[in-house]
Image (cartoon, coloured by chain):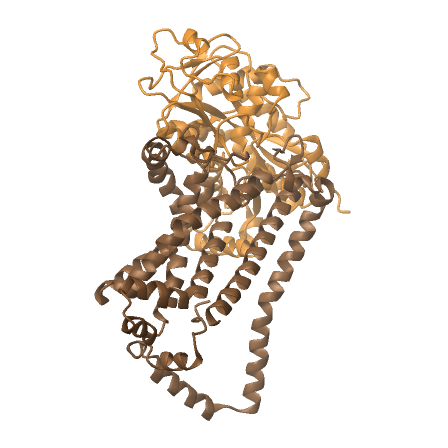
Chain colours: A brown, B orange
Amino acid sequence: MTEPAAPLAPRVSFVAREDRPAPSRGWMPWRAKDRRRVNMGSSAVGDRIYKVAIALCASTVPLLVVLITVALGIAAWPAISEIGISLVTSSVWDVGARKFGAAPALYGTVISSAVALVIATPLAIGVAVFLSEFAPRWLRQPVAFLVDLLAAIPSVVYGLWGIFVLLPIMREHVMPFLRDDLHLGATPFFSGPAYGPSMLAAGVILAIMALPYISAVSREVLLAVPRSQREAALALGATRWEMIRDAVLPFARSGIVGGIILGLGRALGETMAVTMVIGNRPDISASLFAPGYTMASLIANEFSEATGDLHLSALMAVGAMLFAITLIVNAIARWLVWQVGRGARA
Amino acid sequence: MRIIPGAALLLTILACGKEQPRTSADSQVASSGGSVDLTGAGATFPYPLYSKWFSDYAAKTGVRINYQSIGSGGGIRQLSEETVDFGATDGPMTDEEMKRAKGGPIMHIPTVLGADAIIYNLPGVASGLKLTPDVLADIFLGRITKWNDPRIVTLNPGVRLPATDLLVVHRSDGSGTTYIFTDYLTSVSNAWKAGPGKGKEVRWPVGLGAKGNEGVAGQIKQTPGSIGYAELAYAKQNALSMAAIRNSSGEFITPSVATVTAAAAGAASSLPANTDYRISIVNPPGAGAYPISSFTWLLVYERQKDSVKARKLVDFLNWALTEGEAQAATLDYAPIPETMAANLKARIATIAVAPTR
């Protein structure tokens, strides 16, 4: 996904790769040395062993996916056959009454991730553009390092921070501001009491967690845009902003979309931090102020204490649904990256 | 899964290094050297006490017990599959669960008592809030929504109750703490019994779900007007405001080790002789008894397959019910009454080794 997008014209691309600001990283000499070594040391037996070993490594990944799918399917089957479609359509999750409807969790997973992307995407692209186009050289590395550091914080730490810092801020400042000062309370999306734990809080936490992924990928992609591309735009009389908007961003489009999808993947599967701030209420509400639930937090909350066979199986079915959603999102992402890449070439 | 025995082994080896040479009161164990003698899994709520028990017991007898606090549900599952030697749970097993156990009938052995404190955050009312069972049930049913509801006001003369909204906070994860609380509400309120009922997770009519005692406590500490429940030891150690609840004798009782012990005494006095100890002791009779309390149990098979392990298990259980009980109060657990402990020991003596099939 970090591969730079196809260039506008093949010739430009050739030149671009030549004058990429890479020598400072020292990759060219290294590469040349490496090539020489491979040519000298190869032998038929060594090659074959190498090939088999690599093939084995490569096959473990698809094998794992197949194994996970099969295991989930087998474990989820009793619930799927007994509960059927109401697993997806019903909103009643009542363990005692053996009713398992995961619609609120499904809804919550999608909405919280969507909120996260709405918040994180502009921020992350802003960070990436600043770092690749505007920031003085001495500032680039420290800021990039700090942004990347966000990705290294364990999610339970985000959750605790959410409980003790984010939720009070949301309850006392952000939510009243949105509802009363901006008069958004008139819309169903920002109405109701502001307790703190809510779909909005979950979205904000997820946005912070997804941001480093989107911005790191976007930054790399923007840095890979050839300098000639920028120079050409400036030579035509573009301002700096026009240059970024018309020459740099379109060039990097498919890579940025890839980064967004990576962030979405992070948001969909996040469990601990979301569980701690979303309010864990299996209801579907239009208001982002209302507490909600996600599939991952449902599983995390109930799995360790589940004893009934149907309950366990229903949780497995929810896991299978989450897996399916992730697969679909990834498929859409592939298609989007491909589509956007083709669009840029045309 | 595979890592756990390895880690246990490693720990044992480390422990071996430090330990004094054993005067073998238990020669069978000493000969086998480093391995873990008994494994158990289950409830997290009594874990602080159990881990102290296991380490004291190992120091005293050399018998090592590896316990994983994976939750009551996991404990029941693992015991049913016979992957552990004993289980532990905060809610008794249902008949259906008992039937599924692969190793035959399971014996429930109460070890200590725990209680749920009703915790709240009401500015200006740091302590002394009084509630009756029906008011408590109606708060959690969503029928009482304001702090200055007339029914709360009449119970608390002289307390200035604000006109703010009540925010109910409950556990989102399945837990024995929830089981105790919903068991209590079920026993005192018909509406609750007909509605959410009792269980380790129920369908809450109102409120927010928070994960773990710390999640509930954190939410309540920060939100003025909130009310919820947490395990007594946790609430006490974190100095949360606790409400006094009216018991069956009409007294308002604040939870403490003493009032929970009184509850156990009240419950034990009314036990039938042939009880299997799968009993609920919420709302017990007796003066000074705190009503929202429960036993926590160890689970063992009545017919054991391995005579060496069975011996060690029985010895440990007897130790736990005598010397172990004495340590309970220091960790904010209420010990079980002495007469009951004596009856339990007689029951433990009936654990037999099944003939090999």
Residue A13 found in image quarter: bottom left
The quarter in which the N terminus of chain B is drawn is bottom right
Residue at image position (43%, 40%) is A200
Q: Residue furthest bottom?
A: A40
Left of A242 or right of it: where is B293? right
In the image, residue B51 above or below residue A36? above
Residue at image position (30%, 57%) is A146
How many numbered dots are placed on residues in this image?
A: 0
Image x and y of residue B144, in percent: 48, 16
Residue at image position (47%, 33%) is A188
Image x and y of residue A201, in percent: 41, 40
Say which of A187 and A5 sits in front: A187
Decide if residue B337 is in sight here.
no
Q: Residue furthest front?
A: A237
Say which of B29 and B87 sits in front: B87
Residue A51 found in image quarter: bottom right
Image x and y of residue A23, in percent: 30, 79
